[in-house]
């Protein structure tokens, strides 16, 4: 459904490892953090804020429990129903890169593969977090998979029942100021630990229990924006993904 998801390849914009195309609010934020001697230093880890919804289910991580000659396994989660989900790539380096695999481990350490996701292409990570109404209803889950290299590019949204269904991509990360070589730098972190999920009928809501959200694309002509988390949320319904900024719904354009 989607093409390569390295920043810039997916939506026709340059890769933004150097904070290009920053809007005025972004530049002001960086200037305040980098040049002012009396300004706050490195960010402290966000303490989760109280927002509606529940956090991701805490399925335990496992040591590799299958042997597969053609896959390099990055991490594995026990779904509690006799199945597991692993993040893995082909032993031989390919452009497609990582995928999510749902499988059942056999007694001989082979894998009965149940479902395979679309690839992550040149993303170095595809760390999944699982959301839903009930952690035991493992055939009725929603997955946010973090994409990125050294920093987060955003979250791929999947529906997981008997298969992985590609739905949309959230161009959102958690901004953090860190001190490197005596310079205060902006880093874009995986925001999924701060996502809070709830449902109302056919609509899913994704809110952020952190201080601020970094939007690569605000769907209104702005790029690389940092906004208060309380002003940003996403919703999913059968018609597609919406980004809400200060109560204004904005359809999220997806790569073709």
Image (cartoon, rainbow, N blue to C red):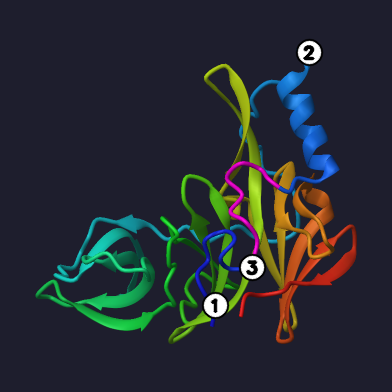
The vertical placement of 250 against 29, above or below, is below
| Residue 48 % position (x, y) | 67, 43
Residue at position x 14%, y 70% from top? 69
Q: Which residues are magenta?
A: 11-20
Task: Confirm whether the magenta stretch covers residue 16.
Answer: yes
Task: Confirm whether the magenta stretch covers residue 189.
Answer: no
Q: Which mark is residue 2?
A: 1
- Residue 230 seen in the figure: yes
Quick one: SS at disc 1?
Answer: loop
Q: Residues within 10 Å of mark 3 (few under 14, many from 20)?
A: some
Q: Quadrant of residue 216?
A: bottom right
Residue at position x 84%, y 53% from top? 231
Residue at position x 70%, y 68% from top? 198
- Residue 79 seen in the figure: no
Q: Which numbered disc, 2 or 1, marks the residue closer to the eye?
A: 1
The residue under label 2 is 38
Ranked by sequence position, the earlier of labels 2 and 3 is 3
Q: Which mark is residue 11?
A: 3
């Amino acid at each position: 459904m989607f093409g390569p998801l390295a920043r810039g390849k997916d939506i026709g914009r340059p890769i933004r490892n150097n904070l290009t195309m920053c809007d005025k609010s972004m530049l002001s934020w960086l200037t305040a953090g980098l040049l002012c001697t009396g300004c706050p230093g490195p960010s402290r880890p966000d303490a989760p804020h109280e927002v509606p919804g529940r956090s991701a289910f805490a399925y335990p991580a496992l040591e590799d429990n299958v042997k597969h000659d053609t896959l390099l396994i990055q991490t594995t989660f026990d779904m509690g129903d006799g199945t597991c989900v692993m993040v893995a790539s082909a032993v031989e380096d390919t452009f497609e890169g990582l995928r999510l695999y749902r499988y059942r481990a056999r007694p001989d350490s082979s894998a009965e593969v149940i479902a395979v996701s679309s690839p992550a292409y040149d993303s170095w990570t595809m760390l999944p977090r699982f959301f839903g109404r009930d952690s035991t209803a493992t055939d009725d889950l929603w997955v946010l998979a973090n994409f990125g290299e050294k920093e987060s590019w955003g979250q791929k949204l999947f529906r997981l029942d008997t298969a992985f269904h590609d739905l949309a991509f959230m161009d959102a990360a958690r901004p953090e100021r860190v001190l490197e070589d005596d310079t205060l730098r902006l880093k874009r972190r995986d925001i999924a630990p701060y996502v809070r999920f709830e449902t109302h009928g056919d609509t899913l809501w994704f809110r952020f229990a952190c201080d601020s959200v970094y939007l690569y694309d605000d769907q209104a002509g702005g790029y690389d924006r940092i906004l208060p988390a309380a002003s940003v949320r996403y919703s999913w319904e059968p018609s597609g993904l919406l980004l809400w900024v200060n109560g204004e719904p904005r359809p999220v354009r997806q790569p073709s």
